């Protein structure tokens, strides 16, 4: 039996019961605040995730998910986002998807490679809600590189679970094109007839895409094929611009006013650290996700 599938089928109700028990006894927040924690998922001791609970955290706090790229530096994500979590009062979860077990995590594990990373994330979220009383009804999600691919595809499959997303430098995209099979489009997922897409819900999720201005190399990690190059462009910067333009046009064609922002980060290549230090990526991400008073701004996408 697939471990993730077994856990997914039982974990939610178990965690709800434990949460109610802890709440009645006043035992929420059994893990320390203000400290980055490496935790093993209950029932799956080989699954690690990183957690940060801000000092000012209260019950019903929003949940911020940060998904690593193929270098898998999940702890670095939490370390750099922790100061923003303190400011905005959100709980940070950074799952760790080891390559041997999740070599297809960018596609959620539904491409026949590795385990189902989407199910594992759901189990982690359920556990954190049990521990903290966080509000996971609508998630605030960020991903870098391969992690941005995960977040965009998770959002397309589960738009009802997501509030807003920020995608940083994904190598390539799934377009909400009903004429193309997944992962290029959303026509169908071969071998998974139980999974489907709701175009209107997909186009209703506010999205910010961030790419370093120097992220134009066709490096060894960039997915390359004639179909992808023709549909999306030849590098991450070009592909991101085309995807945002397509999403914006699709939303407007369906009478939706969904916000799509494109932000080019100065003096930054394909590096999480450069984007954080030189491009102020953390500020861009948290402002877009949580500071809704800012609304759209001068970073909005322009086709030029």
Image: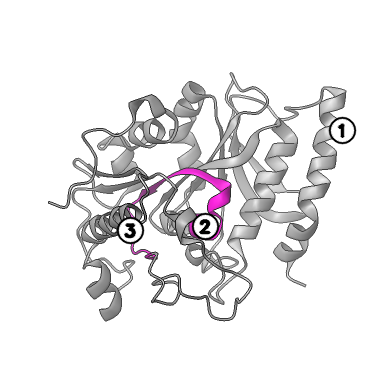
Mark-to-mark CA distance, 2 and 3: 19 Å
- Mark 1 lies on a secondary structure that is helix
Residue under label 1: 21
Among numbered discs 3 and 1, the one appearing first in the sequence: 1
Magenta range is: 154-175
Magenta stretch encompasses residue 105: no
Image quadrant of residue 295? top left
Residue under label 3: 250
Q: Is residue 89 above or below residue 119?
A: above
Left or right of 184: which side holds 8? right
Depth check, mark 3 against mark 1: the one in front is: 3
Which residue is at a point 64% across and 34% down the rendered structure image?
135
Seen from the viewer's position, the closer of residues 152 and 246 is: 246
Left or right of 128: which side holds 284? left
Depth check, mark 2 against mark 3: the one in front is: 3
Residue 142 in the image, given as x and y percentages of width and height: 45, 45
Mark-to-mark CA distance, 1 and 2: 31 Å
Left or right of 243: which side holds 23? right
- Mark 2 lies on a secondary structure that is helix
* Residue that lies at the very extreme toward the front in this rendered image: 255
- Mark 3 lies on a secondary structure that is helix
Report whether residue 225 is seen.
Answer: no
Residue under label 2: 154
Seen from the viewer's position, the closer of residues 259 and 114 is: 259
């Amino acid at each position: 039996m697939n471990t993730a599938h077994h856990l997914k089928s039982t974990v939610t109700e178990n965690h709800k019961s434990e949460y109610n028990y802890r709440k009645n006894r006043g035992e929420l927040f059994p893990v320390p605040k203000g400290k980055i924690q490496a935790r093993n998922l209950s029932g799956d001791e080989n699954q690690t995730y990183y957690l940060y609970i801000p000092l000012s955290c209260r019950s019903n706090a929003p949940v911020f998910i940060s998904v690593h790229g193929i270098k898998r530096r999940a702890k670095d994500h939490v370390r750099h986002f922790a100061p923003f979590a303190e400011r905005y009062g959100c709980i940070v979860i950074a799952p760790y998807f080891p390559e041997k077990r999740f070599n297809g995590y960018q596609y959620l594990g539904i491409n026949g490679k590795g385990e189902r990373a989407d199910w594992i994330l759901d189990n982690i979220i359920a556990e954190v809600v049990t521990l903290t009383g966080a509000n996971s009804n609508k998630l605030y999600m960020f991903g870098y590189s391969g992690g941005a691919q995960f977040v965009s595809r998770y959002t397309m499959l589960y738009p009802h679970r997501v509030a807003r997303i920020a995608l940083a430098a994904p190598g390539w995209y799934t377009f909400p094109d009903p004429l193309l099979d997944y992962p290029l489009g959303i026509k169908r997922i071969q071998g998974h007839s139980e999974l489907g897409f709701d175009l209107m819900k997909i186009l209703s999720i506010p999205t910010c895409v961030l790419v370093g201005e120097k992220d134009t190399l066709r490096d060894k990690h960039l997915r390359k094929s004639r179909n992808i190059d023709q549909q999306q462009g030849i590098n991450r910067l070009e592909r991101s611009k085309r995807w945002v333009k397509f999403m914006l046009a699709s939303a407007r064609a369906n009478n939706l006013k969904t916000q799509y922002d494109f932000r080019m980060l100065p003096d930054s290549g394909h590096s999480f650290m450069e984007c954080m230090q030189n491009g102020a990526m953390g500020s861009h991400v948290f402002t877009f996700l949580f500071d809704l008073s800012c609304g759209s701004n001068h970073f909005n996408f322009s086709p030029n």
